[in-house]
Image (cartoon, grey):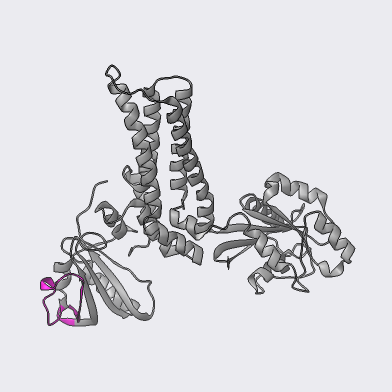
Amino acid sequence: MEYSHDTISAISTPLGIGGISVLRISGDEAINIVSKIFKSKANLEDQPSHKAIFGRILDAGKLVDEVIVTIFKAPHSYTGENVVEISCHGSTFITNQILSILLRNTRLAEPGEFTQRAFLNDKIGLTQAEAVGDLLTAKTKISHLAALQQYEGSLRKRIEKLLTQLTDFRTQLELEIDFLEQDLDEIDNDNLLNGLSTLNQELIYLAKTGEEGLIIKDGLKVSLVGAPNVGKSSIFNSFLETERAIVTPIPGTTRDYLEEVISLNGYLVRVFDTAGLREATDQIEKIGIKRSYEIIEDSHKVLFVIDGDENIKEYKTLSKLVDADKIIKVLNKTDKFEEAELQAFKKKGYVLCSNQESSGLFELKSSLLENIEISEEELNSGILTNTRQIAAVTKATQSVSKAIQSIKNGMGYEFTAFDLKEASTALEEIIGRVTSDDILNNIFANFCIGK
C-alpha cells in the first residue's frame, strides 16, 4: 500500500459538551504546524518527546482557547511519526474552531488513518490494529478482555507459532526437492504425515474459536418464538427487567420484531422478540412475520415458548428454519399447571418458566450460555474475532489437508510444498505480513476519524 507522508489532523473525542476535547495531529510537520498557532513560555519545537505544555491557541493574534499540548516525537509515538495532541475545553464550537485552523495546513484524517499509519510504520501488527477497533466498540467485560488480549499480541503469537511449524515442514520438503541426488537423509513420510495432521488439528481448533469470537464481538443472537399470546413479550421484558415490549392479551401485538441488548455473565446478548409464526392476512403483519423468519434463521439460540399446547405443527416449522440443537423449549405460565403436568413437560425437555412467580428465569438465562463460555486461559492463548481471520485460517486448514492428501497419494513433494506455501500465505495475511489495499481499507474503514 502506498504510504502518504502528509500531515493529518482530526478530533479524537466525541463531539459534545464535556470537560475536555482532544485533537490529534500526525506527520512530519505536526510539531512545526502546531507551534505556529500555539503560544507558551516554552518553544514547542525545542521540547523533549512525551511532554505536556500549557499555553494558548491563537488565530491571527486572537485568543481561541487555553490548552494543554502534548508532543510525541518520531519514532516514539502511536503512529511512528511526530504526533501532537491538543486538549482544549470540551465545547463543540471551540473544538471545531481549532480543527478549522489546523486544516489550513493539514489534511483531515480518513477513518482509522492514525492506526493505519501505526501499522504501516511497524508500530503494531494487523491483528493488534483490528483489536484497537474492537476496543473502541467493546460493550461487555468479555468483549473488552478479548480485544485487550488481542491487542497484547496473543493471536499474533499463536499465528507466528503455527507459521514456524509450517516453515519447518516446508524447509524439509524444499531440501528434499532441491538436493534429491545428494546423500541426504530421506524424509520419513509417517512422521511428516503425523506432524502435518497435528498441525491441521490445531488449525481446525483455532478456526472453531472464531465462532465464539464472533459471538463475543457481535453478541449472542437469541430469538423468542411461539404462538401469539403465549407470553414471549413477558419473558422478553423479564430478561430486560423493563417494560420494553408492549404486553397485551390481544394476539398479534408484536407485528414486527423488537431487539434489545443485555449483558449476561459478561457476554453481549441480543434478544429478539419476534412476531408469532402464523398465517396472516394483514399485509403489515405479513411483513413482520417475514422479518421474524429471517431473524430466527440467523439466531444462535431460539426459545420456543408454549403455554400448554405443544403446538407440534409450529415446532416442525421452526425445525425447518434452525437446527434442533439451537432450540430451547420453554413452558411458560407454569403457575397454572399441576405438579404432575409440569414433571411430564420437564421429561420432554422443557425449561419451566413463570413470570408471575418469577421462576425458571435463571435456568433459562443459564441455558443460553451453554457451550459458548470461554475460559480466560483460552482468551489469553488467542482467538479469532472476525470473518477475515476465520476465512484465512479455514483456507490454511484446507491447504494443509490437500498437502496431507498429496503425500498419501504419492503425488511428489512439489505438490505438498506448494500446498503448504498456500497455507503459510493465508496465515501471513492474518498478521499483515502479506496483505492488500482492499483488506486494509476494509479494516480501517470502520474506525472513527480520530483513531
Indicate whether 69 appears above or below 435.
Answer: below
User: Looking at the image, can residue 273 be seen?
Assistant: no
Residue 205's place in the image compared with 303, above or below, is above
Q: Give how far across and how far down residue 312 sits, in percent.
A: 82, 50
Q: Residue furthest top?
A: 181
Residue sitting nearer the eye, 79 or 314: 79
Q: Position of residue 336 (x, y in %)?
A: 86, 69
Up-down: is 440 above or below 225?
Answer: above
Residue 191 left/right relative to 346:
left
Give whichever of 410, 391 is nearer the camera. 410
Q: Determine the image quadrant of residue 268.
A: bottom right
Q: Quadrant of the C terminus?
A: bottom left
Where are the magenta residues, as a range?
Answer: 39-62
Tell me how many marks there are: 0
Does 54 lie within the magenta span? yes
State left or right for residue 296 relative to residue 331: left
Instruction: Residue 374 in the image: state x and y as whole percent.
Output: 54, 57
Corner quadrant of residue 415: top left
Residue at position x 55%, y 59% in the image: 219
| Residue at the image point whose x is 35% and y is 32% from the top | 170
Q: Is residue 56 magenta?
A: yes
Left-right relation of 127 to 350:
left
At 34% from the left and 27% from the top, the residue drawn is: 173
Q: Is residue 224 above or below residue 49?
A: above
Residue under the point 81% across and 58% down: 346
Residue 218 x %, y %:
52, 57
Q: As rendered, which of 447 and 72 lies closer to the eye?
A: 72
Q: Is residue 265 visible?
A: yes
